[in-house]
């Protein structure tokens, strides 16, 4: 049994990090993390599922944590609900519009 003065069972590690910093992943890293083939990510990019900026990109796309979350959401709907590519594209547009409206609503409420 430990004494109340022994901090070892309750040790806390504090790590300083930049809250605005976002991790960036290459196509291969993102595919490995999410568990899909890199070509599927390229296909999602070409179809515009990540927005127009990655749909027209000539260089290898890079992914951040938000895009990895989107890929996981795409794969969930594709695998578990049988959602096809066109429906995914529509859902992505709706999700982005909802996020845009949330930001706008927060801005209006803060006035």
Image (cartoon, rainbow, N blue to C red):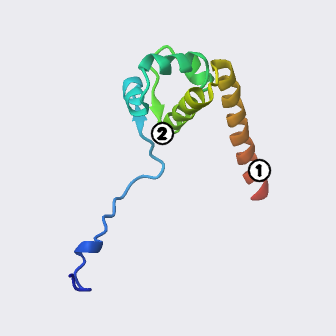
**In the rendered image, which residue does mark 2 sit on?**
65
Secondary structure of the residue carrying numbered label 2: helix
State left or right for residue 13 relative to residue 1. right
| Marker disc for residue 105 | 1
**Mark 1 and mark 2 in contact (Cβ < 8 Å)?**
no
Q: Position of residue 14 (x, y in %)?
A: 33, 64
Q: Quadrant of residue 26?
A: top left
What is the CA distance from the residue labelled 2 to the residue labelled 1?
24 Å
Secondary structure of the residue carrying numbered label 1: helix
Is 26 located above or below residue 107 in the figure?
A: above
Identity of the residue drawn at 24% across and 85% down: 5
Q: Quadrant of residue 9?
A: bottom left
Q: Residues within 10 Å of mark 2 (few under 14, many from 20)?
A: few
Identity of the residue drawn at 66% across and 30% down: 92
Identity of the residue drawn at 73% across and 53% down: 106
Q: Nearer the viewer, residue 93 or 19?
A: 93
């Amino acid at each position: 049994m430990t004494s109340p003065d022994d901090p070892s069972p309750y040790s806390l590690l504090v790590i300083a990090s930049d809250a605005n910093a976002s991790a960036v992943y290459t196509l291969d890293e993102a595919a490995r993390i999410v568990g899909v083939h890199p070509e599927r990510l390229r296909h999602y990019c070409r179809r515009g599922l990540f927005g127009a900026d990655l749909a027209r990109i000539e260089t290898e796309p890079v992914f951040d944590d938000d895009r990895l979350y989107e890929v996981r959401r795409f794969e969930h709907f594709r695998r578990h609900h049988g959602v096809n590519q066109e429906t995914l594209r529509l859902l992505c547009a709706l999700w982005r519009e909802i996020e845009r409206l949330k930001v706008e609503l927060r801005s209006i409420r803060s006035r």
